[in-house]
């Protein structure tokens, strides 16, 4: 009987040790999975935000902070040269167009005018038309939302697409969203509920300023949420990106 009791006790100890080992392994792999998810969220956020903001010009209003966790970015799509307008100025002739002009429809174009650059809404794009005789075969005519008779011939026009990046809930968890018109896509997450996505302006000295007119750069920060089921204060990943703009 004594020997049997010893065997049972050793078996219990062995099972307890095995259970502890399995629990430790589970915790390790859960931590690794959580770290991988955080790294992936940060990587995706960096790639998307960099693509949208790296050529933004604060001076031209390409980035506007609508709220601490919501910004509007005007992304350049290409370039073209203005060759002239129709008699009313409502149609703009464009030649030597480069870039993704097809994505412009329904958004805007920066037009060089006598008083400076202005953002004009584009209602339609078409090929050459007799109303704008300067446009050869292969050129583009942009119908504008208002006349631009003083558009500067020979100057470069820049098409762009406006999108909004914001922190919003997806299935109860905060995510970085990209909003393009009626299209709304979750980009990266889950993020921290309060500081998951924030943006601010800085001047050349690094001080926070209130308006883009006095800013040298826009700074955005993404903070991931801890893995599900982990205790408060668990690790978060943070990335801070600064964009000064190519054409300040």
Image (cartoon, rainbow, N blue to C red):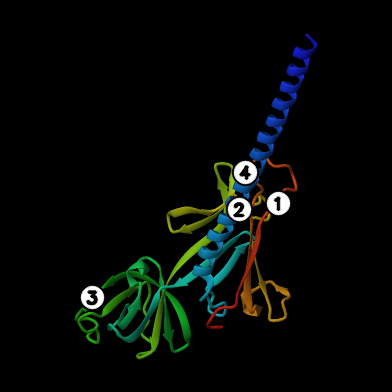
Q: Looking at the image, do the residues carrying marks 1 and 3 touch, with CB atoms under 8 Å apart?
A: no
Q: Looking at the image, do the residues carrying marks 2 and 4 touch, with CB atoms under 8 Å apart?
A: no
**Residue 84: which quarter of the image?**
bottom left
* Residue 127: assigned label: 3
Residue identified by numbered label 4: 29
On-image quarter of the N terminus: top right
Q: Position of residue 240 (x, y in %)?
A: 65, 66
On-image quarter of the C terminus: bottom right
**Residue in the picture at 75% in, 13% down:** 4
- Going from N to C along the chain, the mark reached first, 2 or 3, is 2
Packing grade of label 1 (10 A; few <14, some 14-19, many >=20) is some
Nearer to me, 9 or 194:
9
* Residue 61: assigned label: none
Q: Position of residue 232 (x, y in %)?
A: 74, 44
**Residue in the picture at 37% in, 65% down:** 106
The residues tagged by marks 4 and 1 sit, at their Cα atoms, a distance apart of 15 Å
The residues tagged by marks 1 and 3 sit, at their Cα atoms, a distance apart of 55 Å
Q: Which secondary structure, mark 4?
A: helix
Nearer to me, 27 or 240:
27
Question: Left or right: 114 with respect to 16?
Answer: left
The residues tagged by marks 4 and 3 sit, at their Cα atoms, a distance apart of 58 Å
Q: Residue furthest top?
A: 1
């Amino acid at each position: 009987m004594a020997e049997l009791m010893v065997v049972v006790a050793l078996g219990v100890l062995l099972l307890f040790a095995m259970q502890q080992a399995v629990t430790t392994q589970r915790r390790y792999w859960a931590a690794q999975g959580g770290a991988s998810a955080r790294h992936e969220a940060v990587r995706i956020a960096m790639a998307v935000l960099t693509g949208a903001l790296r050529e933004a010009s604060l001076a031209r209003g390409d980035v506007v902070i609508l709220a601490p966790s919501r910004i509007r970015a005007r992304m350049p799509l290409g370039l073209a040269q203005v060759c002239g307008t129709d008699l009313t100025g409502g149609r703009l002739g464009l030649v030597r167009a480069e870039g993704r002009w097809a994505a412009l429809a329904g958004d805007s174009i920066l037009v060089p005018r006598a008083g400076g650059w202005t953002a004009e809404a584009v209602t339609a794009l078409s090929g050459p038309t007799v109303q704008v005789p300067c446009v050869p075969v292969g050129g583009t005519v942009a119908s504008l939302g208002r006349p631009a008779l003083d558009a500067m011939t020979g100057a470069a026009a820049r098409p762009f697409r406006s999108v909004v990046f914001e922190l919003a809930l997806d299935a109860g968890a905060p995510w970085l969203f990209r909003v393009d018109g009626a299209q709304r896509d979750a980009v990266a997450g889950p993020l921290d509920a309060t500081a998951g996505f924030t943006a601010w302006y800085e001047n050349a000295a690094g001080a926070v300023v209130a308006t883009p007119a006095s800013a040298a750069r826009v700074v955005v920060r993404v903070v991931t949420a801890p893995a599900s089921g982990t205790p408060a204060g668990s690790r978060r990943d943070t990335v801070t990106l600064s964009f000064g703009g190519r054409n300040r």
